[in-house]
Amino acid sequence: MTNRQKTIVIKRVPRTVKQHSFPINTKDFEEMKLIAKRYKDVKNYVYSRYSGIHSLLILKNHKKLIRDVWVKTTFAEQWKLPARYWKLALDEAISNIHSLWSNTKNAVRKALRKNPNVTEDEKNYMYYLLKADELLHAILVRETFKKPKKISRLEIRETYIHNLLRRYIRKYKGSIPYSHKETVFIIDAPMYKYIVEGNSFFIEMASLKPRKRIKISLTEPNKYGGNIRIIMKDHSIELHHLVKTKQKTIWNEKNEIGIDKGHKNLLAASSGHLYGEKLNELLNNETERLNKKNAVRNQYWALAKKYEAEGQVEKAQNIWKNNFGKKKYHHQKLKHDMTVKSVINFSLNQFFLIERPSMVISEDLSFVSWNDKFPKSVKRKLSRWIKGYVRKRIEFKCNVWHVEYQLVNAAYTSQTCHKCGEFGNRQGDIFKCKNCGNMHADINASHNIKQRKDDKEIKQYTSYKEVKKILEERIEKKMA
């Protein structure tokens, strides 16, 4: 058996599987809508009450400090939901608040790495505080606290650093994450069961009334366990299950591949291959269609406003009634999005099957803004690019294929030659280097991205100004 044929079974990777229902009768559907609305109300109360800095320490023990108190004081009865529903809503909201704090702390860490006005001791001090919620809480609410030995000897500007930390938290924490969806709720295992009647397959789930269940006909006879997220759509529902998929085969040989993500090709690999070339055509067609569609709608909107100003109310009302429907508009947009996602997933599968990488090195685009980088026509396409979706799918497929995934600094990877390191000019798909000639711009960028993995001077969070300085110094050394 060759090295390529050897396989190793590794852990399982979580993914979402969807089930669909047949149309649901109006009475049951209205009851489910009421459950979803009350479920949302519980979540929003938790968000408003426990998202702030004063509740930071409560989150660690929310079942005792919130849930049990609600039960003892009968506070939860106001929601008019069975206990299992409001407890799931509470748990989901608290989990989201935990994620909010985690994202905030990560954003603060990134900002610290890029802040040249903070010393190493001060950075280490703030990193420690971000891990210790008791100390972080004391600083945010301006309480005194005793410093642990690990940070007591660090030389810091205490007042400045504490104020900086408060500013960072205010900046990156954002507003209260209210939920506006009245079509989503969660059920757990004791709240439902699958049943088979003849050739039909059903799920029965808990209703608002004790010992009464809502019976729903499903389109496929698959059974799953654990929690189910219910999403209501046009008198039917989607059931989202979190399942775990076995990681696929891995190959013993080392094969590190750099990738450059773009709007013309989905991926350019350092091996010289391009993936997702159909994506650009899809994005072009849809963005231009939407642009024309919205231009016509804007004309109708201006005309309706004109008629209203002139007192021709009936004409204005006819325009509002007959030209601004969203159903077809959203249906076409959703259909396009599904097609784009299909192309993205197919292209990524091709990438992994052809390249068989042991590591994928990608550019970190967290701090990249498109505002000044591209003209309007390109930015319209990038807005349809589903940048976050592409990143998540790459990460997911790296997990499935047991491939290591590493982010590197993106600064100047598209503007320098990977062979000689000189700055060049990019014109469309062509990168022009005065020393090495012309080459494919995205392939050149993918080589630079791969080389960044082992660059000891240019770290992931090195500022772009510092990166340019380092690159210019390297060119000067070569010329000397």
Image (cartoon, rainbow, N blue to C red):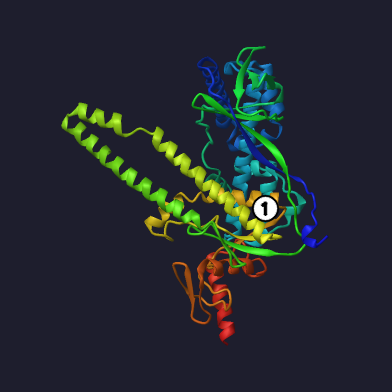
Q: Is residue 270 left or right of residue 225?
A: left
Q: In the rendered view of the protein, which quadrant contains the C terminus?
A: bottom right
Residue at the bottom extreme, as displayed: 480
Residue at the left extreme, as displayed: 310
Q: Position of residue 398 (x, y in %)?
A: 67, 53
- Residue, x 49% and y 54% (percent of image)? 279
Q: Position of residue 314 (x, y in %)?
A: 21, 26
Residue at mark 1: 398
| Above or below, comparing residue 374 to residue 210 in the picture | below
- Residue, x 55% and y 57% (percent of image)? 365
| Above or below, comparing residue 41 to residue 245 in the picture | above
Q: In the rendered view of the protein, which quadrant contains the N terminus?
A: bottom right
| Above or below, comparing residue 208 to residue 249 in the picture | above
Whether residue 160 can be seen here:
no
Depth order, front residue of 213/223: 223
Badge 1, how many Cα within 10 Å: few under 14, some, many 20+? many
The picture quadrant where one finds residue 207 is top right
Whether residue 45 can be seen here:
yes
Q: Position of residue 437 (x, y in %)?
A: 50, 79
Dot 1: element: helix
Q: Position of residue 392 (x, y in %)?
A: 60, 48
Q: Which amino acid, by three-letter code, is at mark 1?
A: Cys
